[in-house]
Structures are given as C-alpha cells and as structure tokens.
Image (cartoon, rainbow, N blue to C red):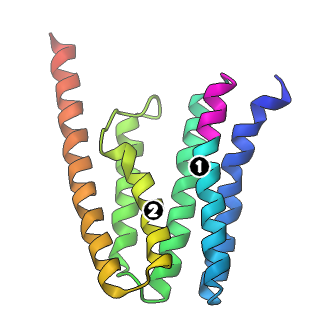
Amino acid sequence: MSCQSYIPNILTSVRFVAAPLFFYTFLNDLFLISASILVLALITDVLDGYIARKLDVTSDMGAYLDVTSDFVLIVACFLAYVIKGWYDPLILLLIIAMFLLFVATSGLKKPVYDPMGKYLGGYLMLMILASILFPEFVVRQILFIVLILICLTSVLTRFFFIRRSKELQSL
C-alpha cells in the first residue's frame, strides 16, 4: 500500500481535530478563527473523497470514517451553538437521529441510496457556516426550518427506497 492511499484518510482525520478546535474557539468568542477552522474542514471534506476516487483508493472503511468525522464535527459545532443559545437543544436530537437512521439503514455495508440524505451532511455544514457568517436570529430560524424539511424528505426517501428494494427482491 502506497503512502498516497493514506492521504484521503489523513484529510478526513483533520475534521476530528477541527471539531474540538471549533468548539473551543466559538465558545471563547473567537468567531473569525472558528469560521476559518470550519472552512478548512469543509475543504478537507470536499478533497478527501475526490482524492480517494482520483487515486482509486476508495473503501467502505474510508466512507464510514468520512461520515463519522462529519458527524463529530457537526455535533461539536451545534453543541457549541446550543450552549451559546443560538439553537434549541432539540436540534442535536434531530442530527443524532438522522445519523442513527443512516447507520441503521446502511446495514453496516453499503449506504442506502438516499437522494436527499446524501445532501443532508452538506447542508448541515453549510448551515453551520451560514450561522456563523450571518448570526441573526431570523437567518438561523430559516436555516432550521429548511433542515427540518430536508430531514423529513430524507426519511421519506429512505423509507420508499427500502420498501421498493424489498419489493424488487421478492419478485
């Protein structure tokens, strides 16, 4: 195995480090640093998958490491937002429930194709960034409402995909 095959996982691991750094800097009102950490994390999120595909070193383990690092970063960011009073604590339950739904429907093998769910993580990352760049209450409320709509759509598409898959298997 070449050193190049480790590059995507190293990029993914940056988000595990970014999570507590964002949490600390945000809670200490270092918003510019928090935003910079988040932008770096977003860049690694884009690059890790791209590089893994380009180098042909994709793996199920890498895919789950990617999802897990995203989840850790997202939870850390929203936990900081909740502590500061920017979002209701129930948002954390929604995010955790959606992650658990992903894990449960993935069967710990290949993820269930979910046209909306695959964008949920991206939306959450953009929601975190938009919240720090535009910290007005009304912006956060709109972002939260859109999140609820995306989550509901994701749950429905997963349900229908699983149902359809079972129907096709029974034929």
Q: Quadrant of the C terminus?
A: top left
* Residue 48 x %, y %: 64, 41
Type of the residue with mark 2: Leu
* Residue 33 x %, y %: 68, 77
* Residue at (56% x, 60% y) in the render: 72
Judge whether residue 58 is colored magenta: no
* 129 displayed left or right of 147: right
- What residue did someone put label 1 on? 45
**Is residue 58 in view from this perspective?**
no
* Residue at (55% x, 50% y) in the render: 68
Q: Is residue 164 above or below residue 148?
A: above
Assign a secondary structure to mark 1.
Answer: helix
The residue lying furthest to the top in this view is 171
Image quadrant of residue 130?
A: bottom left
* Residue at (25% x, 40% y) in the render: 158
* Residue 2 x %, y %: 84, 25
Judge whether residue 52 is colored magenta: yes
Question: Main SS of the magenta segment?
Answer: helix
Stretch of the chain drawn in magenta:
48-56
Q: Quadrant of the N terminus?
A: top right
- What residue did someone put label 2 on? 126
Q: Is residue 13 above or below residue 140?
A: above
